[in-house]
Image (spheres, rainbow, N blue to C red):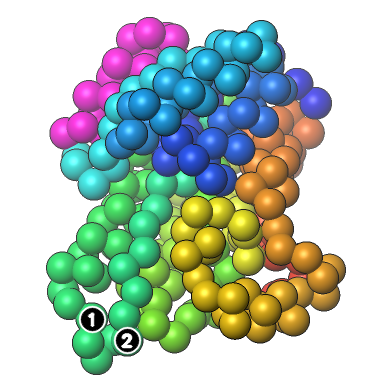
Amino acid sequence: MTLSGRVALVTGASQGIGQACALRLAAAGATVALAARNQEKLNEVAQQIAAAGGTAAVFPLDVGDEEQIKSAFKAALAQFGKIDILVNNAGITRDQLVMRMKRADWDAVLNTNLTSAYLCIQQVIGPMLKQRWGRIINITSIFGQTGQAGQANYSASKAGLIGLTLAIAREVGSRNITCNAVAPGFIETAMTSRMGDDFKENALKMVPLGRIGTPEDVANSVAFLASEEASYITGHVLSVNGGMLMG
């Protein structure tokens, strides 16, 4: 499975799942455009890729800002000439019970997790249509499939990503462009590390495979969906959850 000659852009690439995806795509041979807010962390990821013999470039970007999205994608297209693979990974949480949730927290999560994916897709869809090849991969969540108390905004944004995935898959399938989603379960990241030990213990009891997932578990799935081996898969939600949700 090789991605040699392909160019991938990963949002939220500075840490966690996004970083793992960037490293895995680079290991498969793709040139990687790294996008996130923290330029220092992005530089570290780029250095890791370069040290392993890969190619990467940094594009500082706040996906909550439409103009920054347009500028960053324009710069990446100018530097590399194309974007073959888009991984919409950037995401935030602003947890609160819905009766206490502030409108600003609802808007921030929907804007960052869902609206940004739509805007990023708009930036690459034209070039992908022209070259008649593309891979769009949206990182959703098990909570977009099951819901989660205290995360109405997050669950809604991730469920929306699934709907967006299905719609885009239907729109562009005839041009050899696939659009799929990866739905992680309980993954060990900076976001989940803030959760209490009791929560982690209870969550682990719900995982038939008996372990917490790693960012690399998700990244391997993303690399597969980006490859030629997955060319007949589109409009699919790939669950990477250790069996927490089946069917």
Coordinates of residue 13 in the picture (x, y in percent): 47, 35
Residue 211, quarter of the rendered image: bottom right
Between 240 and 53, the residue placed more toward the observer is: 53
Image check: 111 left or right of 49? left
Vertical comparison of 168 with 131: above or below: below
Residue located 23% across and 47% down the image: 64
Coordinates of residue 54 in the picture (x, y in percent): 62, 12
Tell me the SS state at disc 1.
loop
The residue indicated by pointer 2 is 97
Tell me the SS state at disc 2.
loop
Between 175 and 163, the residue placed more toward the observer is: 163
User: What is the C-alpha distance between the residues marked 1 and 2?
Assistant: 6 Å
Residue located 56% across and 54% down the image: 189
The residue indicated by pointer 1 is 101
Q: Main secondary structure of the magenta part?
A: helix
Residue located 30% across and 36% down the image: 37
Tell me which segment is drawn in magenta.
Answer: 67-84
Instruction: State which quarter of the image contains the N terminus.
Output: top right
